[in-house]
Image (tube, rainbow, N blue to C red):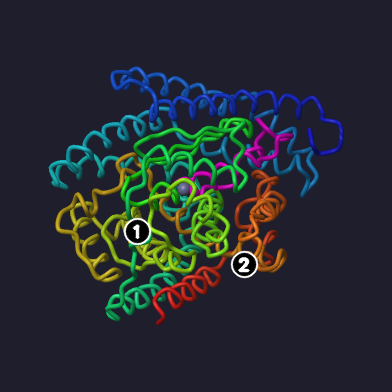
Amino acid sequence: MTSGEPAGADETRLYEIWGEIADLEAATELLEWDQETFMPAAGQEGRGKLLGTVAALIHRRLTSPELADVLARCAERARPGSLLAAQVARARHAVGRAVRVPESLSRAIAEAASAGVVAWKRAREAADFELFAPALRRLLDLRRQQAAAIGDGGPPYDAMLDGYEPGATEAQLTPLFDQLRRTLTPRVRAVVESGKTIDESPACGHFPAAAQEAFVRRVAAGIGFRFEAGRLDPATHPFCVGLNPGDVRLTWRLVEDDFRPALFGVLHEAGHGLYEQGLPAASSRTPIGAIASLGLHESQSRLWENHVGRSLGFWRWVLPTFRDHFPAAPRFTAAELWPALHTVKPSLIRVDADETTYNLHVVVRFELERALFAGELEVGDLPAAWDDLYQELLGIRPENVADGVLQDIHWSQGMFGYFPTYTLGTVIAAQLIAAAERQLGHLEELLAAGEASQLLGWLRRHVHRHGSRFEAAELVVRATGKPLAADDLLRYLDETIERAYGA
Ligand code: ZN
């Protein structure tokens, strides 16, 4: 291994077992990727069983007595702060979450999640929350049981967060989300009340599908995504899966009358993909060879999507390529387009939200999840609580539950504690960019000169190459010199709004 000292027999055995677990996890990723891209519709039921079998195999290996013994012996041998200590800590985190949950409960959660998705789809089509409420109650109940099994006596919501963002707690996140709510709500309201609008015509026109595909591929390659170690395929929802640093798959979708959804979707997923391609090859198939957390993963996508893709420097660089691909598109300069990439418009649907209001959509979900887990909110009162929060934070109210509480799939799959990672990622992205800029100089100039590789190199050194050796919070301190905080994000949004709206 990479620790520089000869690996003992226990260590070797640890990596053998973990190699199998990592391979099974990669197989799951590949099966899920295929399910969303090329699998025939009639394959759904069979694929569900296949995924269930692979999940059971992973669970069996994680909970094997041999792995527990090997880890205990490695822990004795590991010097504090060493690579081996990090390997043991990461492995124990995963093992702990698996071992403490009885197999019957795991199976009940998986079944309730698949029933939840079916109920959610029906409820969303009928715009009738009551069709989903029983499934949601069941999922919450099971997740509370799981939290009680895993947790160390803290709030049950912490055990949910820890599944996506190891080490994160409700107590830590609450002040951060409160700050975003307090600062962004009046900022958005001021833009709306100013009555000022931005001319978005430069972004609209006719952008043929084939030209969009050629363009987004050029852009992804231009920021450093290696197509010899990756793919890009069409799918209903954009996403990224990484089987290993040599096989990273992105998906995308487009609309023909606006180039922004495809371009920013691909920049986002390529940001995820650059992280996956930059994970430490020497630690592949070991506990620390993986991503540090979902929030950190999202920081990489938001960084390329927002701080690079919406910057003037990036557009100075990409505009000639854009014109080559879309000769009939409206003629605009980078400066004329720029405001259209920074609109602030309260809207009902999270996935369509702009970079400012997006965080308020996440605040709504964080506050509601937390209240549900704390027993302060009953499932029956959820739709009204949702609508009231939208009114309070964004000044708009959904007309029906399909555009309100039923818009996201996450809760129907039993995924509670996932939403906060979206905003954590946005916060981390702004902090990383500020730190990179302090070291590399003005990024606008670098990007305008087509030097995105310098930024990628910085991210490789400070983030990607560590895999999950450090927890996300520690990695942020190491990379930026300070603990996670929303200041850089709020400053960025403030300056952007001021420049775009002149207010
Ligand atoms: Zn993402």
Residue at horizontal 82%, vertical 30%?
A: 7
Residue type pointed to by label 1: Ala
Does 298 sit above or below residue 287?
below
| Amino acid type at image mark 2 | Ala
Q: Residue at x 34, y 73 (%)?
A: 188
Classify 10 Å Cα crowding around label 2: few (below 14), some (14-19), many (20 and above): some
Question: Does the magenta segment cover residue 272?
Answer: yes
Q: What segment carries the magenta color? A: 265-294
State the quadrant of the N terminus: top right
Q: Which residue is mark 2?
A: 434
Identify residue for label 1.
353
- Residue projecting furthest to the right: 5
Q: Residues within 10 Å of mark 1 (few under 14, many from 20)?
A: some
Task: Report which quarter residue 144 is drawn in.
Answer: top left
**Measuring 72% from the left and 51% from the top, which residue is drawn there?**
461
**How far across and how far down the image is residue 35, in percent?**
39, 26
Q: Nearer the viewer, residue 317 or 123?
A: 317
Q: Secondary structure at mark 1?
A: loop
- Choose between 496 and 365: the one closer to the eye: 496
Query: Circle 2 sits in a helix, a strand or a loop, which is it?
Result: helix
Q: Is residue 147 left or right of residue 86?
A: left
Give the image location of residue 5, x and y in percent: 86, 36
